[in-house]
Image (tube, rainbow, N blue to C red):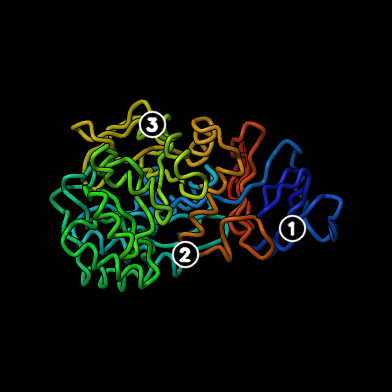
């Protein structure tokens, strides 16, 4: 049982409260004076200045701490799952990158197998696969290797999803490419998020894609047709259509802080999803690292390809949360919506993730008075404690 901290629960804020955890779940919470059965629990006293918030859900992450999803090994996924709680991430979508069919198939087979056999409390939970590429536009490739980019193909996707044990939960694609709308319709029919990204679609093409079932935009502003007064593009469509949730990388590098604020003013807390888009160099020193078979130089907080193109981030989720508050002036309640609630809604898992509520998974982050991650619990088990190693 956690006791003494402020609680940012579903629909309410408790000034001094308790949370009882049992069998991976939250079984009770409330004001401290309503606490019952205290003797039945191991009690962890938490300072009254600390805050309990729901675990963060990262829908777009490639790697961390030297590991990458495309390594296609159990060890790589275990490294990611054990490292991410340090930044408050309690669940995530393992995100692929444009590569050869063989490399993508190896990665998704590995993720499907890991999800079936290796998910343990105390580590961040893999919720599924975010397939980023290869169905994107070469003109907006960014760090996606151009020579592996192909047009959206429904039969290829069906084969890959079968290989993954139906674990693909989100697909980033360029809907203006041949076969794009057909794939979007299929994704919608099967409860999979169709996210517009690495796309040169016009505003009208995006409107058609929304009608076909798209519900998201991948890393808003980055590698998409931007806002122009004679062609609103993908960005303009994201601003004008509430049907589209927009991922945002709030590192101050991928997007200027004032543009983050503009996006927040336009989309509000309900319309944005915080992501890291982090690659394997996160948590490591400056140096040269691999992303999709390409050398990436990491220096001064930036990850760049040889030609200067941004190649993912080394952003930690806890920093994204603090940056969002700093850039926009939004409240902690607002940013919880973007970090936890909205991803859970998009993934249709609000029955167990996204908020502090009775019966939900005990995915909890304890923030100190400076909003730094002090403790993280993944499905009821202490996964990280600042200054100490979790058992």
Q: Which numbered disc, 3 or 1, marks the residue closer to the eye?
A: 1
Q: Which label sits on residue 118? A: 2
Packing grade of label 1 (10 A; few <14, some 14-19, many >=20) is many
Q: Quadrant of the N terminus?
A: bottom right
Residue toward you, 8 or 213: 213
Q: Farthest residue in the top direction?
A: 300
* Residue 33: x %, y % from top left: 86, 51
Tally of marks: 3
Q: Which residue is mark 1?
A: 20
Mark 3–mark 2 CB contact (< 8 Å): no
Q: Is residue 299 above or below residue 244?
A: above
Residue toward you, 123 or 16: 16
Left or right of 336 on screen, residue 45 = right
Q: Which numbered disc, 2 or 1, marks the residue closer to the eye?
A: 1
Packing grade of label 2 (10 A; few <14, some 14-19, many >=20) is some
Q: Is residue 355 above or below residue 118?
A: above
- Image quadrant of residue 290? top left
- Image quadrant of residue 121? bottom right
* Residue 19: x %, y % from top left: 73, 54
Q: Which residue is mark 3?
A: 285
Q: Is residue 109 visible?
A: yes
């Amino acid at each position: 049982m956690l006791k003494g901290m402020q609680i940012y629960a579903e629909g309410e804020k408790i000034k001094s409260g308790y949370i009882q955890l049992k069998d991976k779940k939250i079984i009770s919470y409330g004001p401290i004076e309503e606490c019952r059965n205290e003797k039945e629990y191991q009690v962890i006293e938490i300072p009254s200045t600390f805050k309990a918030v729901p675990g963060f859900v990262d829908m777009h992450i490639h790697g961390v701490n030297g590991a990458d999803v495309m390594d296609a090994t159990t060890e790589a996924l275990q490294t990611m799952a054990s490292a991410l709680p340090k930044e408050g991430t309690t669940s995530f979508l393992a995100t692929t990158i444009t590569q050869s069919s063989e490399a993508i198939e190896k990665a998704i087979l590995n993720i499907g197998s890991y999800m079936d056999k290796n998910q343990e409390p105390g580590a961040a939970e893999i919720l599924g696969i975010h397939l980023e590429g290869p169905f994107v536009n070469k003109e907006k490739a960014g760090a996606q290797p151009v020579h592996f980019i192909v047009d959206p193909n429904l039969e290829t996707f069906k084969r890959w999803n079968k290989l993954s044990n139906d674990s693909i939960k989100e697909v980033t694609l360029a809907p203006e490419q041949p076969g794009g709308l057909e794939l979007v319709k299929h994704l919608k029919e099967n409860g999979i998020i169709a996210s517009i990204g690495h796309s040169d679609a016009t505003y009208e093409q995006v409107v058609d894609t929304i009608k076909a079932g798209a519900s998201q935009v991948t890393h808003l502003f980055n590698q998409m047709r931007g806002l122009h007064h004679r062609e609103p593009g993908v960005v303009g469509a994201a601003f004008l259509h509430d049907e589209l949730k927009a991922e945002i990388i709030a590192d101050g590098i991928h997007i200027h802080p004032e543009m983050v604020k503009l996006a927040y003013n336009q989309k509000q807390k309900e319309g944005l999803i915080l992501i890291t888009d982090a690659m394997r160099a996160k948590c490591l020193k400056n140096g040269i690292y691999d992303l999709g078979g390409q050398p990436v130089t990491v220096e001064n907080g930036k990850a760049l390809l040889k030609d200067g193109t941004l190649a993912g981030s080394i952003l930690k989720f806890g920093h994204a949360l603090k940056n969002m508050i700093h850039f926009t002036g939004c409240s902690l309640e607002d940013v919880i919506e973007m970090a936890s609630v909205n991803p859970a809604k998009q993934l249709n898992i609000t029955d167990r993730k996204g908020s502090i509520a009775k019966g939900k998974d005990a995915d909890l982050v304890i923030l100190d008075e400076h909003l730094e991650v002090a403790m993280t619990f993944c499905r009821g088990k202490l996964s990280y404690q600042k200054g100490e190693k979790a058992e």
